[in-house]
Amino acid sequence: MPVTSSNWLDMAGLAPAYDNWSGSHIGWRLAGAGVVALLIAGTVLLVWHTGGTKLVYAHFIYVPILIAAGLFGLPGGILAAVAGGLALGPMMPLDVEAGIPQDTLNWVTRTAMLTFSGSLAGAICAVLGRQTAEARLQGYRSPWTRLPNRAQMMVDLDRLIVEGEQSLIVLKIALSHHASTVTSLGHDFADDLHRAAAARLGTALGGDFRLYDLSEGAFGTILPAANYRDAVKLTNTLLAHLDEPFSLQAVPVLAGGHIGVARWPQHGADAPALMRAAAAALHDGGLDVQRRAVYDQRADTERRAMTALLPDLQSALRTGAGLQLHFQPKICLDTRDCVGVEALIRWQHPRRGAVSPGLFIPLAERTALIGPLSEWVALRAVDQLSAWRTAGIDVPIAINLSMRNLDDDRLALALADMLRTRGVHSCRVEVEITETALMAAPERARQSLESLRGEGISVALDDFGTGQCSLAYLRDLPVDSLKLDRSFLRDIEHDDRSQILIGATIDAAHRLGFKVVAEGIEDAGALERLHGMGCDHGQGYHIARPMPDADLRQWLANQPAAGTA
Ligand code: C2E
Ligand code: CA
Ligand code: CA
């Protein structure tokens, strides 16, 4: 193993913060023994001054014996009992004033009784102590893998930081397909996968570093940062180990992995900050082609700033303040007529100014806000259609929906209701749903899309070419048109192979009965090529940028064959 340290975490056992009997705890033990000795001596003096063992004061000796049993277990209980018994033994008279000595049998019996009680108390305390320690230890282990858990990783990190000997690298490792394994194969399979991955990662770490079981499908480890390159190599080894299929119940299962890297002291001063940084990096690692990302403070700050804006977005959605729809025209490539517009939301934040939908839409999608957001967009779009109709403008509007909007029929029904109450024909509205969203939950999405189409609303598959959607899969999807993503069309003018691919896609889409829209057309050359390939419609900065209602009316009025009724 290339990354090693002679002074690293003890791999043999767990070392939680409370269980540290070395060093300063020896001091506590000596202090405890001193207190017991003083209490025995105090009892002897008390018994002597009160006149000897004939009175009850001799029973005070139980106090130091029980304390010794509590502190030192069985040996402590026995030792204190024998010491106390002897101290109250042959030298101590039965009656000090009268000078009457104790019977030998008397003090021997008492010593025996004390020893029995001390042993019993010591044994009980030892058992209870062990049980308590074991119970506490459970808090530092994963019940699934018996590996040290997140709490232990925090303790170890803090300890290494306090020791201050190393700069550190914290790795958070996730099984990329754990969640999909739960959905497709069930929890038992996913648990088996987790355990099998833990064993493999343990092998990859080679026993040099502690592997932590952080949560379902997530692990961690701490490395010395002395040689960063070696640490990078190690991450590659870990990923390679996770790439090999696992054989579970004789079924080959893919786990895949991605890793987040955080460094101390650069990325956080203490364990919670480092764990948070590693988790943020893990998120980026999941999106990176290398499947590994180092914590990026700037991106994280930006993300957190965005998250902090969510309450403002919520109130904006309530009042509508700062929100607006812009419309980007879509033209027929044959006639150059405007055949529709795409509604794109714009948010003007009171302090931050314009916030890009590319930033706040993904956040809204991760919260319940995407529901009200899409409803707001739908309502504004339908209102706009009704206003345009009054003004004699007849242009359909496409609105973007998120996967979460298709979880149930609510939005579809609300949209149909809005159209009815405003007397707008449903063929004036189109919805766009991204290819990746549709792939994520095809069945549920399919039903919602079917009910939208049942209402007469057409459906476009957005960003086509960015996911893994195949044409064969498209065959059964309830969509009317495909929107070829800008990235898919990037090399259209210069790369022959791209042209073949784009041409074949357009051709196949037509044969399957779909209309094809090209997105992000930025120059005349691309527009002409797409036209030559038979693409139906086009949209992009070369044609028109997204614009507010007033500008759109102006733009439409300036078109040679204006899209007006
Ligand atoms: P999208 O649906 O793919 O929308 C097209 C995006 O590309 C828009 O960015 C548009 O301004 C931009 N665009 C159009 N033509 C060109 C071009 O020629 N070149 C370049 N470079 N870009 C072009 P925008 O408005 O920033 O929206 C980004 C994404 O945010 C949208 O991608 C869509 O996924 C989402 N979004 C926007 N509005 C809404 C909304 O009301 N609801 C939902 N759910 N998502 C929305
Ligand atoms: Ca779109
Ligand atoms: Ca798009």
Image (cartoon, grey):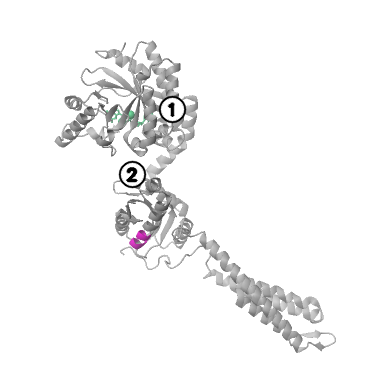
Q: Quadrant of the C terminus?
A: top left
Indicate yes or no whether the magenta region holds residue 202: yes
Indicate yes or no whether the magenta region holds residue 63: no
Do labels 1 and 2 touch, CB within 8 Å?
A: no
In percent of width and height, residue 490 lies at 22, 34
User: Which of disc 2 and disc 1 is earlier in sequence?
Assistant: 2
In percent of width and height, residue 201 lies at 36, 59
Q: Nearer the viewer, residue 103 or 279?
A: 103
In percent of width and height, residue 374 lies at 42, 28
Residue at 17% of width from left, 31% of height from top? 493
Q: Nearer the viewer, residue 401 or 71?
A: 401
Q: Is residue 83 visible?
A: yes
Picture disc at residue 542: none
Q: Quadrant of the N terminus?
A: bottom left
Callout 1: SS: helix
Q: Nearer the viewer, residue 262 or 404?
A: 404
Q: Amino acid at mark 1?
A: Leu
Furthest-right residue in view? 98
Callout 2: SS: helix
Left/right of residue 92 with respect to residue 363 in the rendered view = right
Residue range corresponding to the magenta coloring: 199-204
Q: Is residue 427 above or below residue 478?
A: above
Q: Is residue 265 visible?
A: no
Furthest-left residue in view? 496
Kindly indicate the quadrant of the structure image that contains residue 54.
bottom right
Residue at 81% of width from left, 78% of height from top? 55
Picture disc at residue 287: 2
Instruction: State the predominant SS element of the stretch in magenta.
Output: helix
Residue under label 1: 411
In percent of width and height, residue 418 lies at 44, 20
